[in-house]
């Protein structure tokens, strides 16, 4: 846990145990358009915190754990040619999500989440990929449910949760090229920021990351890749080995 906000400069470990349920149900209502609902449940227990650390000494929502239970509506539009390594098409997911006592939650907060992606194959059969992630949080959300900047999927190079706040905006771009056999190479870049309030937006709080990686195609038909990436931001870096593209 590094703290909350753009000035977060802590670095402490804590333990968390939580049985978890994640349910998404979607039904196709028109070509490429899906409508559905989401239900999430976590029962957090945080048994160990750093002595005299931020979680131990500051008034942070969720530091003693508790039940997170909520439901929401999902709107999805998807014209991608593949969900695993898209080469062309458009993807948009919009989620409105509510946690509250009516669902058995110990916390009262709401989220709006928007994920938009676009993929274009150029004349050299290389792929340009773009993604915009927007997350708004309102109410009294526990610290583990705030918008988290970083990780292997968004803003590679930053530890997930290096910056966390109520609101987050991330823009990512990636250039993907096939080399030979089943090998490929990518270069990527991203910018992102978190803010407590929308009116607090400040260009000085924008973070950046750049990097590159290799791809090994494991299955030709489904285009599932082994992904090896290295990302670099300001005074930070990250290395990732996993299956599937970041977006």
Image (cartoon, rainbow, N blue to C red):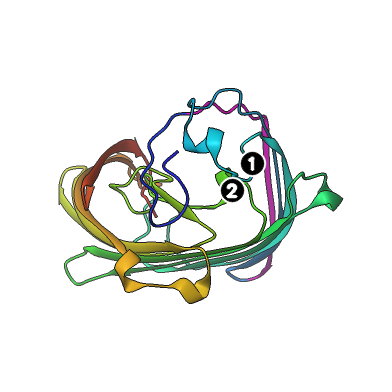
Q: Nearer the viewer, residue 144 or 204?
A: 204
Residue 107 in the figure: left or right of residue 9: right
Given residues 114 and 107, the one toward you in this image is 107
The residue drawn where x is 63% and y is 45% is 61
Estimate the x, y position of residue 186 in percent, counting from the top left. 21, 53
Q: Give residue 42's position: percent from left, percent from top.
A: 68, 38
Residue 58 painted magenta: no
- How many other residues sit within 10 Å of disc 1, few (<14), some (14-19) or many (≥20)? many
Q: Residue furthest bottom?
A: 199
On the image, which quarter does residue 206 sit in? bottom left
Main SS, magenta residues? strand
Q: With respect to residue 179, does 16 lie above or below?
A: above
Q: Name the residue tied to disc 2.
A: 145
Q: Is residue 142 left or right of residue 186?
A: right
Q: Is residue 31 above or below residue 172?
A: below
Q: Position of residue 138 (x, y in %)?
A: 64, 63
Q: How many residues crowd around disc 2 within 10 Å: few (fewer than 14), some, or many (20 or more)? A: some
The residues colored magenta run: 14-30
In percent of the image, x 65 and y 28: which residue is there? 45
Discs 1/2, front: 1
Identify the disc placed on residue 153.
Answer: none
**Which quadrant: the N terminus?**
top left
Q: Closer to the N terminus: mark 1 or mark 2? A: 1
Res 238 → quadrant: top left
Residue at x-position 74% and y-position 45%: 69
Give the residue pinned by disc 1. 62
Residue in the foreground of this view, choosing between 177 and 205: 205
Q: Quadrant of the C terminus?
A: bottom left
Would you say residue 128 is visible in this rendering? yes
Tell me the element at label 1. Answer: loop
Callouts 1 and 2 close, C-beta under 8 Å = yes
Check residue 23 for magenta coloring: yes
């Amino acid at each position: 846990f590094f703290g909350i906000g753009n000035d977060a400069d802590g670095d402490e470990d804590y333990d968390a145990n939580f049985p978890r349920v994640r349910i998404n149900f979607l039904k196709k209502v028109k070509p490429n358009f899906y409508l559905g609902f989401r239900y999430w449940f976590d029962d957090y227990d945080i048994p160990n915190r750093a002595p005299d650390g931020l979680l131990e000494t500051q008034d942070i929502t969720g530091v003693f754990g508790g039940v997170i239970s909520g439901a929401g509506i999902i709107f999805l539009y998807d014209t991608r040619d593949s969900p695993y390594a898209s080469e062309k098409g458009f993807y948009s997911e919009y989620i409105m999500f509510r946690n509250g006592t009516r669902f058995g939650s110990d916390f009262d907060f709401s989220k709006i989440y928007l994920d938009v992606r676009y993929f274009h194959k150029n004349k050299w059969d290389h792929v340009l990929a773009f993604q915009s992630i927007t997350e708004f949080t309102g109410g009294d959300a526990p610290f583990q449910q705030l918008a988290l900047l970083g990780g292997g999927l968004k803003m590679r190079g930053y530890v997930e949760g290096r910056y966390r706040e109520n609101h987050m905006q991330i823009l990512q771009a990636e250039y993907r090229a096939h080399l030979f056999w089943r090998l490929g190479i990518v270069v990527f870049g991203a910018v992102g920021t978190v803010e407590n309030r929308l009116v607090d937006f400040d260009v000085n709080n924008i973070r950046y990351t750049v990097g590159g990686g290799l791809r090994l195609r494991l299955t030709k038909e489904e285009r599932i890749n082994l992904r090896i990436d290295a990302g670099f931001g300001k005074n930070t870096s990250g290395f990732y080995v996993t299956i599937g593209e970041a977006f």
